[in-house]
Amino acid sequence: MNPAESHRNEVVLSAEEYDAVRAALAAVTRTGAGAQAHSLNSLLAQWSALVDEVEEGYSWCAPELSHDLRCRNALAGAWPLLPSRVRAIRQPELDGIDERYRRATIPWPGRSEEGARWWTWRVPRRLEIEASEQRDPDWPLGWETMPFSRPAFVEVVT
């Protein structure tokens, strides 16, 4: 690709838009002393990386997945606070990552797929475990706390 062409497609935000994005993210994310502030780019990258992991086979436990979903929760909280032009520019990217997550997961049995924080009510289709891990006959270790039996569409692989 010609470098001049790539610069032509770049979107330049105004100083006010950058300030509004920073304020939106600061309102929904917590950073401790010395911690780096989150950017919209970093949250979208975290969400995409988590989806990559879920697509390949999620190898952590259910509570860890809940923890890992903080990046998506932060995006949900910040999104309505972002300037409309920023949302319009970044919405296709977020929609694409969300769609990948939907394809790599299944909804909790008995839960609606619609509504706020829909991503928290989904289970990875593929759970990866160590061959040496003991597990109950249904769920792998760390998932046995689920309030339902393992759906047939959830594959457990070593």
Image (tube, rainbow, N blue to C red):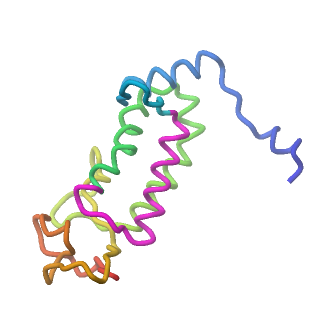
Q: Nearer the viewer, residue 61 or 6?
A: 61
Give coordinates of residue 108: x percent, y percent.
Answer: 21, 64
Q: Nearer the viewer, residue 145 or 99?
A: 145
In the picture, measured across the screen, residue 145 lies left or right of residue 56, that is left
Residue 32 position (above or below residue 61): above
Residue 23 colored in magenta in the image: no
Q: Is residue 108 above or below residue 82?
A: below
Quadrant (top left, top right, bottom left, bottom right) of the C terminus:
bottom left
Quarter-wise, where is residue 8 in the image? top right
Q: Main secondary structure of the magenta part?
A: helix
Above-or-below relation of 143 to 28: below
Q: Is residue 74 left or right of residue 22?
A: left
The correct choice, above or below, for 122 with respect to 10 in the image is below
The residue depicted at 30 percent of the width and 56 percent of the height is 65
Count every numbered label the image shows and give the total.
Answer: 0
Say which residue appears at 30% left-offset and 83% top-offset.
131
- Left or right of residue 102: residue 17: right
* Residue in view at x 23 percent, y 61 percent: 62
Queried whether the magenta region covers residue 54, the answer comes back as: yes
> How far across and how far down the image is residue 48, in percent?
49, 54
116 vs 20, nearest the viewer:
20
Picture coordinates of residue 28, whole percent (x, y): 36, 29
Q: Position of residue 151 (x, y in %)?
A: 21, 76
Residue at 34%, 44% (x, y): give it: 70
Q: Residue furthest top?
A: 16
Which portion, as a residue range, is magenta? 39-64
**Quarter that holds the N terminus:** bottom right
